[in-house]
């Protein structure tokens, strides 16, 4: 049974930083696609950042490029999202998601179609005030 557990959300003022963590239980793979997806109230889910372990390729939504960094600690089986220069429009529920069987191309596609991820965490709230 695969389980993803997020932590690190909270409230911060605009311009501040947060780091989200996602601990994975139940599976270990060196060739998987993992990512962060967010959903603000009344809006559709948005792929924020993705990481394809097989090639080490990272993917980012245009709205977060240069501000967010996705990384993975294989020893701890944990995925991270470092968020800097936060803006009020970054306010959302952030979900960790994974697909152990996606190809590199499919992983890229998850950014525009995040429903393709197979496993999801419970979400962690990020609130940015102006």
Image (cartoon, grey):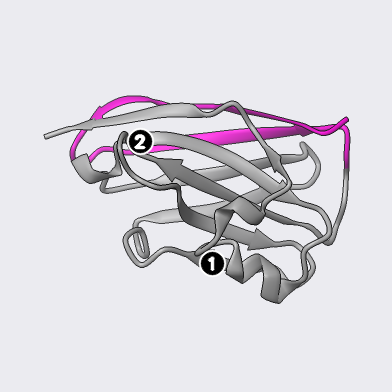
**Quick check: 109 left or right of 19?**
right
Percent x, y for residue 120?
66, 37
Range of residues picked out in magenta: 1-27
The answer to whether residue 22 is magenta is: yes
* Mark linked to residue 59: 1
User: Which residue corresponds to the image point at 54% horizontal and 53% vertical from the top-left?
Assistant: 70
Q: Nearer the viewer, residue 100 or 71?
A: 100
Classify residue 48 as left or right of residue 28: left
Q: Position of residue 86 (x, y in %)?
A: 27, 44
User: Disc 2 vs disc 1: which is toward the camera?
Assistant: 2
| Location of residue 66 in the rendering, given as x and y in whole percent from the top left corner | 35, 64
Circle 1: element type: strand
| x 54%, y 37%: residue | 95
- How many residues crowd around disc 2 within 10 Å: few (fewer than 14), some, or many (20 or more)? many
Q: In which quarter of the image is the C terminus?
A: top left
> Which residue shows up at 31% across the image and 61% down it?
63
The residue labelled by disc 2 is 92
- Return the residue nearer the eye: 113 or 55: 113
The residues tagged by marks 2 and 1 sit, at their Cα atoms, a distance apart of 19 Å
């Amino acid at each position: 049974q695969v389980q993803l557990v997020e932590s690190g959300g909270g409230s911060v003022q605009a311009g501040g930083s947060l780091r989200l963590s996602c601990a994975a239980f139940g599976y270990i793979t060196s060739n998987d696609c993992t990512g962060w997806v967010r959903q603000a109230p009344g809006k559709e889910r948005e792929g924020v950042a993705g990481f394809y372990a097989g090639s080490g390729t990272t993917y980012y939504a245009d709205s977060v490029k240069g501000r967010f960094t996705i990384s993975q600690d294989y020893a701890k089986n944990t995925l991270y999202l470092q968020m800097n220069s936060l803006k009020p429009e970054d306010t959302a529920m952030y979900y960790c998601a994974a697909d152990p069987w996606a190809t590199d191309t499919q992983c890229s596609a998850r950014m525009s179609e995040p429903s393709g991820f197979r496993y999801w965490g419970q979400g962690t709230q990020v609130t940015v005030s102006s």
